Amino acid sequence: MNLSTLKSDKKNLNSFIAFGSALVFIGFVDIILSSFFSTNITAFLPDKISYLTPLLFGLFGLYLIRIEFSGNKLLDKVNTNFNSSNFNALLTLLVIFALIKYIPPLLNWFVFDANFAGNTKEDCTSGGACWVFIKVWLNRFVYGLYPDTEQWRINTAFLTLFLLVGASFFVPQRLKKYIIIFLLFVYPIIGLKLISGGDFGLKYVETGAWGGLSLTFIVSAFALILCFPIGTILALGRRSKLPAIRYTSIGFIELWRGVPLITVLFMSAVMFPMFLPDGTYVDKLIRVLIAITLFEAAYMAEVVRGGLQALPKGQYEAAKSLGMGYWRMHFLIILPQALKLVIPGIANTFLALVKDTPLIFVVGLLELAGMVNLAKTNPKWLGMAMEGYVFAGLVFWVICYVMSRYSQNLERKLKTER
Amino acid sequence: MNFRNFKLNLSNKNKDLIPQILTVLFLILVVIYFTINAQSNMGNRGISFGFGFLSQESSFDITFSLIDYDGSHTYARAFLVGLLNTILVSAIGIFFATILGVTIGIARLSQNYLVAKSAEWYVEIFRNIPLILQIFFWYFAALRALPLTVDSINFYDISFLNVKGWYVPKFVWTNFSIFFYSIIFAFISIYFLAKYAQKQRDKFGKQIPTLYISILLIIGLPFLTFLIGGVSLSFEIPELTQLSKTVYVYQGGVSIIPELISLALALSMYTATFIAENVRAGILGVSKGQKEAAASIGLTKGQILKLVVMPQALRIIIPPTTNQYLNLTKNSSLAAAIAYPDIVLVFAGTALMQTGRAIEIISITMLTYLSLSLSISVFMNWYNKKMAIKEK
């Protein structure tokens, strides 16, 4: 049989389309029947061939309808996007078949067979996901071991934060400056005091009890705020013409960038206390914050350095010709421009930071992932690992995806401005 | 000379000197402060600084080791076991991350809408979930769902997958060293062949089919050792044996522990997303004019890809990808979370717990990673210099 006689042409296009689509249709029917109704319409064939029949039907059908230009808009679109060659047709079919085969069971597990009602593990009977587990532990996943009666403090702290950030977008330019200064320098102290308590009639809550998603945010927000000035100074230091300062900065940056975060956290847990006078106790959370801040500052320094290098030399020369000194030149002319250039880079560093926070489990602090680990080992809730990690993964995914989208948008916007 | 005059007489040189001296002084003071504290702290605990403990007996066991190891060996050997395990999981991760990453990077540029979209979603999903969660997921959720030893998943009767790990046949070699040398010899001859072929091409315009000859060499030479070198290979297939009424184990073969599987899976799937983006950027970075110019001087499609697009794309792809390899190696330290005995768990975990020598052990661990990173970045700088376009 000569296949080229089967090549569709304009003359009898319609019959080719009819026959081809019928074959593709049969292929789909075959795969749907075999994966949902467990009936195999090609059971009379040997096992291995029967397994491949949907693919063969589909491939042959797609081959028949492949034509360079037919004039039919839909057909041309299908041919260029899904069916430009035999290999492409095969890929298309494989992707579609994989979706048909695997998406419905996943959906069943997630939604249709899942259990939502009830309060104990025994309520999960239908075989799907046991979201009861998440429902019961949700409070812990968000607040950690923070006492229930005091949780309004965390809520207030975060609500004020969101309101302030939101307000900074809407108030006039003149006030914006003050809000940002307040947010960066005053608010962290107020927020920390509100959550830790101890004064003003607030009950003291030790940092060991903090946890869950709120701890993720606390750690990443503080580390970001603190690592930013250190990173900027390191970046300036690395570009300094004074050798002692330059090599100190290079050494510092390369040291932290060369080691994994987990060893830095180990260091903060076991090695750092050895370096302090006997009897001084630094809170676990503070130690972790210092470790993460120094670690991220090194990465931030490289990001800021990228911005400094991207500025044209003329900016430096213009500032100097106005008689500005080093610090005035940098604070008034160079840094405002350089930092604007690297906003996407900063967003990416922050993204990496958020993704790194679960590591603080090595010193015994339990944020979201750590709380899931704790919950799944609870004797009443054994075997819930899948639900827990899927939930935590989803939460992190949403946070990171939104942030990465935002940073990509920012990148595009800033690019067109220049 | 009063103070004011002194200040006015500061020359430019002195102005530069003062901040530097202050920085150095500050550094020295910090180091001295830490040293004094560390000394008094260690004195209180009755330990003295030193690396002598490395030659002491470790007296702990490691669940997975590439070299001979048990509790009677030294701490130094335990360190080596951890280091080898780190290298092993990194190498496996790098291998699969590269294959997966390149495939997905190319798939993202496919004309096929479905393929491009699936690749895009793969990247979006796996890049935005913390690596540690992915490791937890594979280890605690996915691999724990595997069947028990008795009803393992059977791959053609030679390899078995169950909740205890993956049992694969073990290669039993005789005269392995001859085989090994033949491979090294093959690589050396390929190197010289490539040099020779380049010379021939530059001087006389002769094309030598280097690729085919290389493939022939790398397959043929080791094969020859089987025929005449006395090398032979047999397989030891794992077998299910019953220890007691309910306890079954696989004996023989090689068992790949679930910690290693989940770590390698998570590392390669996570890093692949970054490599895919690098590959995509690299291929997109080659301007269309290059391809059109190549086509207009009559190169075939394969030649365009091999001689024009890939050399330029690789120049963009390789530096950030090496960076990703480095990240993968550093990320392999998350092994400690699922108790895969890598250098962090074995050395900074168990050994530290036993000896209490925090400063020495953490420094050794960090220095190991640091030297690894620095050597790779030195290599990268050298490579970049070599590959940079030499403008005339």
Image (cartoon, coloured by chain):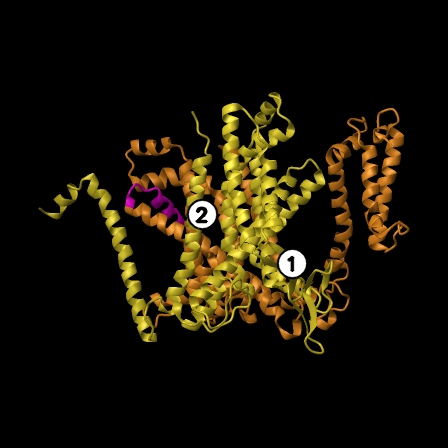
Chain colours: A orange, B yellow
The disc labelled 2 sits on which kind of residue? Ile
Chain of the residue under label 2: B
Q: Position of residue B194 (x, y in %)?
A: 52, 35
The answer to whether residue A230 is visible is no
**Residue at mark 2:** B376
Q: Nearer the viewer, residue A406 or A114?
A: A114
Q: Position of residue A83 (x, y in %)?
A: 76, 35
Q: Nearer the viewer, residue B385 or A120?
A: B385
* Distance (Cα) linking label 2 and label 1: 38 Å
- Which residue in the rendered view is the most extreme toward the left? B1
B162 relative to A331, above or below: below
Q: Main secondary structure of the magenta part?
A: helix
Q: What's the residue at 27%, 57% (across, down)? A: B28
Q: Position of residue B122 (x, y in %)?
A: 64, 48
The disc labelled 1 sits on which kind of residue? Ser
Residue A283 placement: quadrant = bottom left
Q: Nearer the viewer, residue A162 or B306?
A: B306
Q: What's the residue at 34%, 75% (across, down)? A: B45
**Residue at mark 1:** B234
For residue A66, side relative to residue A237 (left or right): right
Which element type, helix, strand or loop, lies under badge 1?
Answer: strand
Front of the two marks 2 and 1: 1
Q: Nearer the viewer, residue B386 or A265?
A: B386
Residue A238 counted in the magenta span: yes
Give the residues drawn in magenta, as a range: A229-243
